[in-house]
Amino acid sequence: MRPLFITFEGLDGSGKSTHLRAVAAHFDAADVPHIVTKEPGGAPLSDAIRSVFLDPRWGDMDGIVELLMVFASRRQHLLEVIEPALASGHHVLCDRFTDSTIAYQGFGSGVALDVIDAVDELATSRRRPDITVLFDLLPEEARSRGQSAKRRAADPAAGGADRLDLQSLEFYDRVRRGFLQLADDEPGRIRTVYSGGPRERTTRELERALADILPAR
Ligand code: TMP
């Protein structure tokens, strides 16, 4: 199989990062070369942008400022990590990519989609993953999972809820609708898995969704 660029998308608290690690464990067990990475971040400069992007001390950030930050992070990540990994025969498992920008900055914050498209063209030549798994659930369920608390525990220096955690449920509802719209528009790339129920059920759905690429156990 040629190296694949595979992304995991969904609301904060959708469980995507946990399921990404499970897919990586499948690859590890079968000695399939791969890397695990995330956005915003994934390269030293991109990680620095991430910490500014998420820091609530900067207060309200205009959607365009957010857009330019995530694409600056993304271009560096693509050039320094993602494309070299693919070129050297590794699958890339990436937590979030441009679909998140369309959903969060576009549908969530109201940045015009053609503006996002223009910056995407400049920064990545509209690079898209080969496969995207979208973990879908209601914003209420996502929030009740306390994802941000987990992130705070992992990084106490971050000090409190991050900037995006402070958004309203209406914002997350718009973001969710954005993801679902993208999945409708690109059914060949985006595979949607329901992640609102028990984790085992989502795991089974995910294994079915990725049956063509997961190594046999
Ligand atoms: P994470 O918690 O999944 O690492 O994501 C960090 C936050 O950044 C999350 O709330 C989604 C947000 N985000 C955007 O708003 N736009 C983007 O392009 C990306 C990649 C993430």
Image (cartoon, rainbow, N blue to C red):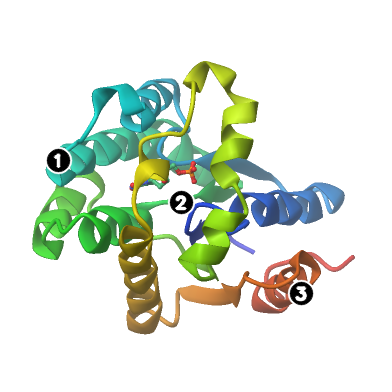
14 to 204, vertically: above or below: above
User: Ligand 1 falls in which quarter?
Assistant: top left
Residue at image point 19% right, 36% down: 61
Which residue was labeled with disc 3? Answer: 201
Q: Nearer the viewer, residue 186 or 48?
A: 48
Asked whether mark 3 lies closer than 8 Å to ligand 1, one says: no
Q: Is disc 2 surrounded by few (<14), some (14 to 19) or many (20+) residues within 10 Å?
A: many
Q: CA distance from mark 3 to mark 1?
A: 38 Å
Residue at image point 57% right, 64% down: 141
Type of amino acid at the residue the image marks with label 3: Arg
30 to 176, vertically: above or below: above
Residue 120 shows in the view: yes
Residues under numbered marks 3 and 1 in contact, where contact means CB atoms less than 8 Å apart: no
Which residue was labeled with disc 1? Answer: 62
Q: CA distance from mark 1 to mark 2?
A: 21 Å
68 to 124, vertically: above or below: above
19 to 47, vertically: above or below: below
Type of amino acid at the residue the image marks with label 1: Asp
Which residue was labeled with disc 2? Answer: 96
| Earlier residue among tags 3 and 2 | 2
Q: CA distance from mark 3 to mark 2?
A: 22 Å
Residue at image point 32% right, 81% down: 185
